[in-house]
């Protein structure tokens, strides 16, 4: 196993630990707890996407030499930067009149150093890299099951509804009990 394959295996193991830590059995009987669970679900979804990308890159590394950009994507921080740039590019396309334009970061920033290490030297190369990254994501990522997400949302709503009904019954019982005691 070469050095890149070892890095990929280590990154996947690290992501699996993070996913396992976030996948516990949490109470979701209040709106606040449900929002916390939805946040954990979004984090798990991001980690799962990154893991799938690493698995794809591992398969590609077994067949051919990875490009400089693909090698950089093995690193979690660079992957997150590219994910963020991709989202910013989508936003800029959807909102052309906004002031958010995609620009190469200032030369002294950590993000610029990461981009330069990946062979990205200016905004034009960055846009091309984002397009390449988006293409890799389409190849590597298995889309989440939308039906499962919808079922989860409905179960959250049902729990809140149940709690509201049970608290209503309790308050009604308390009111009747107190009026009976008088």
Image (cartoon, rainbow, N blue to C red):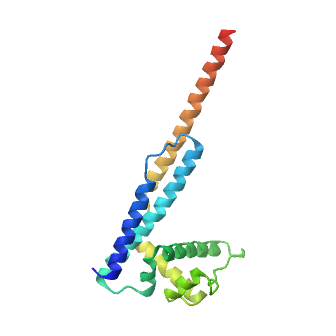
Q: Is residue 25 left or right of residue 37?
A: left
Residue at image position (29%, 80%) is 62
Residue nearest the viewer, comparing 148 with 14: 14
Whether residue 142 is visible to the viewer of this picture, yes or no, is no
Percent across and percent down for residue 64 are 32, 85
Residue at image position (58%, 84%) is 112
Percent across and percent down for residue 87 are 57, 71
Percent across and percent down for residue 76 are 47, 73
The relative height of residue 154 versus residue 113 in the rendered view (above or below) is: above
Q: Is residue 127 left or right of residue 132?
A: right
Where, by quadrant of the figure, is residue 167 drawn? top right
Q: Quadrant of the N terminus?
A: bottom left
The relative height of residue 91 versus residue 171 in the rendered view (above or below) is: below
Residue nearest the viewer, comparing 72 with 162: 72
Q: Quadrant of the C terminus?
A: top right
The relative height of residue 122 versus residue 41 in the rendered view (above or below) is: below
């Amino acid at each position: 196993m070469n050095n890149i394959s070892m890095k990929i295996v280590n990154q996947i193991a690290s992501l699996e630990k993070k996913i396992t830590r976030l996948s516990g059995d949490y109470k979701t009987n209040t709106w606040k707890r449900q929002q916390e669970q939805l946040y954990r679900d979004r984090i798990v979804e991001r980690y799962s996407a990154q893991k799938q990308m690493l698995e794809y890159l591992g398969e590609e590394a077994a067949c051919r030499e990875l490009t400089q950009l693909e090698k950089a994507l093995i690193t979690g921080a660079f992957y997150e930067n590219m994910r963020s740039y991709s989202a910013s590019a989508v936003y800029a396309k959807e909102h052309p009149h906004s002031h958010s334009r995609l620009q190469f970061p200032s030369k002294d920033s950590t993000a610029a150093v990461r981009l330069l290490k990946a062979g990205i030297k200016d905004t034009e190369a960055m846009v091309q890299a984002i397009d390449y990254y988006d293409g890799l994501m389409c190849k590597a990522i298995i889309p989440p099951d939308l039906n499962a997400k919808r079922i989860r949302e409905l179960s959250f709503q049902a729990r809140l509804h149940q709690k509201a009904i049970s608290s209503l019954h309790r308050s009604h019982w308390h009111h009747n009990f107190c009026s009976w005691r008088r």
